[in-house]
Image (cartoon, helix red, strand yellow):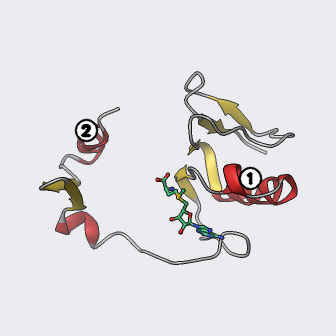
Amino acid sequence: MDLTRSVRNTCGQAPLVQTGDEYELNEAVRGQVEFEEQDLRRRMPEGPFDLVLCRHLAFTYFDEALQRDVLARIIERTRPGGVLVTGKQERLPAPADRVTPAGGDLGIYRVSRP
Ligand SMILES: C[S@@+](CC[C@H](N)C(=O)[O-])C[C@H]1O[C@@H](n2cnc3c(N)ncnc32)[C@H](O)[C@@H]1O
């Protein structure tokens, strides 16, 4: 997926500017982004979100009880119709009632209404 093109199609502008091998948010987008450092085991931004990216952390390194807790909190904070993206090899803990695979086996899930 070309993230820059996808977001440009949605927002009307390129959100990422390439500098050498790296990408940075362009200034207009940067002003709308909040960065927070949190311990996911204890805290998580309140949302609600349309998109949650949670790759190679909770669903790889946390034990199953904590994975269930994190997944429940992500679902609470994701709008119906929103999307959760995990790593391709990661599996969500059962039960994951309100999430449905939406991208084959790519780790993309659609969150439904309660
Ligand atoms: C394997 S890296 C994955 C980074 C990124 N999500 C990706 O997919 O490329 C795991 C990241 O989780 C962060 N991390 C580890 N424990 C954490 C915790 N309890 N809460 C929040 N972040 C944590 C680490 O600092 C590291 O940046």
- Label 2 CA crowd tier, 10 Å (few <14, some 14–19, many 20+): few
Mark 2 beta carbon near ligand 1 (under 8 Å): no
Q: Position of residue 67 (x, y in %)?
A: 78, 54
SS class, disc 2:
helix
Q: Nearer the viewer, residue 1 or 63?
A: 63
The residue furthest left is 20
Q: CA distance from mark 1 to mark 2?
A: 30 Å
**CB of mark 1 within 8 Å of CB of mark 2?**
no
- Badge 1, how many Cα within 10 Å: few under 14, some, many 20+? many
Q: Residue at x 68, y 75 (%)?
A: 43
Task: Name the kind of residue labelled 2 in the image.
Answer: Asn
Residue at the disc numbered 1: 71
Residue 98: x percent and y percent?
76, 40
User: Which mark, residue 63?
Assistant: none
68 w.r.t. 8: above or below? below
Foreground disc of the pair 1, 2: 1
| Residue 103 in the image: above or below residue 108 | above
- Image spot of residue 10 (x, y percent): 30, 42
Residue 35 in the image: above or below residue 26: below
Which quadrant: the N terminus? Answer: top left
Q: Is residue 84 above or below residue 46?
A: above
**Comes first in the chain, label 1 or label 2:** 2
Q: Which residue is mark 2?
A: 9
Q: Residue at x 68, y 50 (%)?
A: 60
Q: Nearer the viewer, residue 54 or 15?
A: 54
Q: What amino acid is at disc 1?
A: Leu
> Residue at the location (74% across, 41% down)?
92
